[in-house]
Image (cartoon, rainbow, N blue to C red):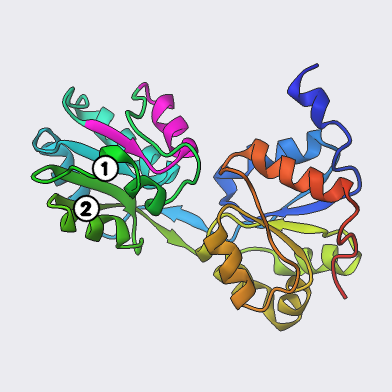
């Protein structure tokens, strides 16, 4: 039996709002629809060029000077690797490190498999806990990330003796979206869950839906990719405990949604 056959019908009657950027939402939406659910597209982020693109170009020119490159997200991989491979080859001595499986898959799509990535949790803490990241004294490390990312990774590696440079490969913006259409779906009982992939996505979502939408959102099932985002949702007053997918992949998100839906939990999404 194929994976598609396994999915059939598992989300029948379930309306799921996908908040990913428009150009990154289709695989998730298709998986939801193959499982019998209804995918409602409502992007709360858009991926834009960094404010200072020159800084990334300068780092790429002297990439041979680094021992390790860490990629914080698939967006960082896509933006950085397109620029790198557009002008040069990757240094053979450069160790490629990904924050998790999704980021590793993005590197692999460029023919540059990750040498290292966490296999259980997919965050800075999990990466820093790996044996290979303990002895970095004297190493030169570049971290490709989005603007405004966390400082924990760089700060910890510097404390361990590494020289660390951050490069902002992209920035996130808040797109225009059809809030009225989303609210109509919600009012008709067609929204049962939201997929929210980051803390910034969650904050944007709350801001975009307005006061009434925030009331409904606090009583609607969320599926998130980390305990950190789940905690943020709780701090923002969400009353339904968020589901945390096992990993940042479409398959894990769909499995979490389907298991929840088949158990008949929280089927009335608002009001």
Direction top: furthest residue: 1
Q: Which residues are magenta?
A: 95-111
Tag shown at residue 133: 1
From this view, report whether residue 34 is shown above or below residue 29: above
Image quadrant holding the C terminus, namely bottom right
Q: Percent from the top left, x then y, of residue 236? A: 62, 77
Q: Percent from the top left, x then y, of residue 7? A: 80, 31
From this view, report whether residue 9 is shown above or below residue 224: above
The image quadrant of residue 104 is top left
Q: Residue at x 65, y 40 (%)?
A: 252
Q: Is 103 left or right of 247, judged from the image as shown?
A: left
Can residue 139 be seen here? The reply is: yes
Q: Are marks 2 and 1 in contact (CB under 8 Å)?
A: yes
Q: Residue at x 76, y 41 (%)?
A: 32
From this view, report whether residue 253 is shown above or below residue 185: above
Q: Is residue 96 magenta?
A: yes
Q: Secondary structure at mark 1?
A: helix
The CA distance from mark 2 to mark 1 is 8 Å
Earlier residue among tags 2 and 1: 1
Q: Considering depth in this image, is 7 or 76 the residue closer to the camera? A: 7
Q: How packed is label 1: few (under 14 Cα within 10 Å), some, or many (20 or more)?
A: few
Q: Percent from the top left, x then y, of residue 196? A: 62, 57
From this view, report whether residue 85 is shown above or below residue 175: above
Tag shown at residue 157: 2
Q: Is residue 211 magenta?
A: no
Image quadrant holding the N terminus, namely top right
Can residue 201 be seen here? The reply is: no
Q: Residue at x 22, y 27 (%)?
A: 90
Q: Residue at x 35, y 62 (%)?
A: 150
Q: Considering depth in this image, is 138 or 201 the residue closer to the camera? A: 138
Q: Percent from the top left, x then y, of residue 56? A: 21, 47
């Amino acid at each position: 039996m194929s994976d598609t056959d396994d999915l059939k019908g598992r989300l029948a009657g379930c309306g799921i709002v996908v908040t990913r950027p428009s150009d990154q939402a289709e695989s998730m939406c298709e998986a939801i629809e193959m499982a019998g659910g209804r995918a409602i597209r409502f992007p709360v982020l858009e991926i834009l060029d960094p404010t200072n693109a020159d800084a990334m170009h300068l780092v790429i020119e002297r990439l041979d000077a680094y021992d390790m490159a860490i990629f914080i997200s698939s967006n960082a991989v896509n933006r950085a690797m397109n620029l790198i491979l557009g002008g040069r080859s990757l240094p053979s001595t450069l160790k490629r490190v990904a924050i998790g499986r999704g980021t590793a898959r993005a590197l692999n799509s460029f023919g540059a498999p990750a040498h290292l990535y966490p296999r259980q949790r997919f965050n800075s803490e999990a990466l820093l806990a790996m044996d290979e990241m303990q002895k970095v004294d004297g190493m030169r490390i570049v971290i490709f990330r989005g603007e405004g990312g966390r400082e924990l990774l760089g700060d910890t590696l510097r404390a361990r003796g590494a020289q660390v440079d951050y490069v902002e490969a992209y920035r996130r913006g808040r797109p225009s979206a059809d809030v009225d259409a989303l609210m109509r779906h919600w009012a008709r009982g067609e929204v049962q869950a939201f997929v929210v992939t980051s803390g910034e996505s969650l904050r944007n979502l709350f801001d975009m839906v307005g006061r009434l939408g925030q009331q409904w959102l606090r009583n609607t099932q969320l599926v998130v990719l980390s305990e950190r985002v789940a905690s943020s949702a709780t701090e923002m007053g969400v009353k339904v405990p968020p589901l945390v997918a096992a990993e940042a992949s479409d398959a894990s998100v769909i499995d979490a949604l389907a298991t929840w839906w088949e158990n008949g939990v929280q089927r009335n999404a608002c009001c």
